[in-house]
């Protein structure tokens, strides 16, 4: 990593949600959303809730801060957008490590470069770049990449 992406391997600050410095990290390339160890932090029980690449900060908070009800996905590949938007039984699976539950989309709204998906139950520790797969029954009807979540 230090050869191919040296700017992401520079030590920096660990901050809380207000931006107060609460510790240090060894380079943002070495951490992921939901991580609880491997960085120095004065807040007991803190987990990485965001990675601020612009400022080289790890943002930490409580485990409960990791639950997101909405996903914005882009770089989508949808089999039939009419079926996707008309269906009330689209199952949403966020791929990756962690406790991401499979759930259903409450609402799917097209955006200029993808879709906004409101989940019926929150997903845990979703991160930028994770793939999302959309199913109806056993059929894959589309997918995309997480652009943001809230």
Image: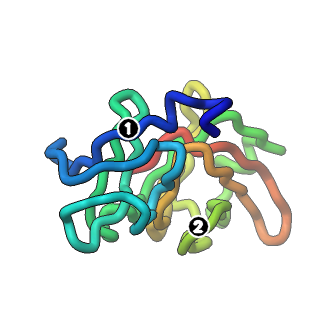
Q: Position of residue 99 (x, y in %)?
A: 54, 74
Q: Position of residue 85 (x, y in %)?
A: 65, 47
Please name the residue that numbered disc 2 is placed on.
Answer: 104
Neighbor class of circle 1 (other Cα within 10 Å; few <14, some 14-19, many 20+) is few
Q: Is residue 38 left or right of residue 43?
A: right
Depth check, front residue: 47 or 124? 47
Q: Evaluate whether residue 92 shows in this view.
A: no
The image quarter in which residue 105 lies: bottom right
- Which residue is painted at 14% across and 45% down in the image? 20
Residue 23 on image: x %, y %: 24, 52
N-terminal of the two: label 1 or label 2?
Answer: 1
| SS for dot 2 | strand
x, y percent for residue 94: 62, 60
Quadrant of the image occupied by residue 128: top right
Q: Residue at x 69, y 34 (%)?
A: 75
- In the foreground, 140 or 2: 2
Residue 28 makes an appearance in the image: yes
- Determine whether the residue tagged by mark 1 lies in a helix, strand or loop: strand
Q: Is residue 146 above or below residue 55?
A: below
Q: Nearer the viewer, residue 41 or 77?
A: 41
Q: Is residue 64 left or right of residue 69?
A: left
Q: Which residue is mark 1?
A: 52
């Amino acid at each position: 990593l230090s050869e191919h992406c040296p700017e992401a391997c520079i030590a920096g600050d660990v901050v809380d949600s207000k931006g107060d410095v609460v510790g240090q990290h060894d380079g943002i390339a070495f951490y992921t959303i939901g991580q609880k160890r491997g960085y120095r932090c004065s807040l007991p029980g803190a987990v990485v809730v965001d990675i601020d690449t612009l400022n080289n900060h790890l943002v930490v908070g409580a485990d409960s801060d990791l639950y997101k009800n909405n996903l914005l996905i882009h770089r989508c590949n949808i089999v039939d957008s009419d079926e996707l938007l008309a269906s009330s039984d689209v199952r949403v699976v966020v791929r990756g490590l962690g406790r991401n539950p499979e759930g259903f989309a409450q609402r799917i709204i097209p955006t200029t470069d993808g879709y906004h998906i409101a989940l019926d139950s929150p997903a845990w520790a979703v991160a930028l770049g994770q793939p999302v797969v959309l199913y109806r029954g056993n059929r894959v009807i589309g997918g995309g990449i997480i652009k943001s979540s809230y």
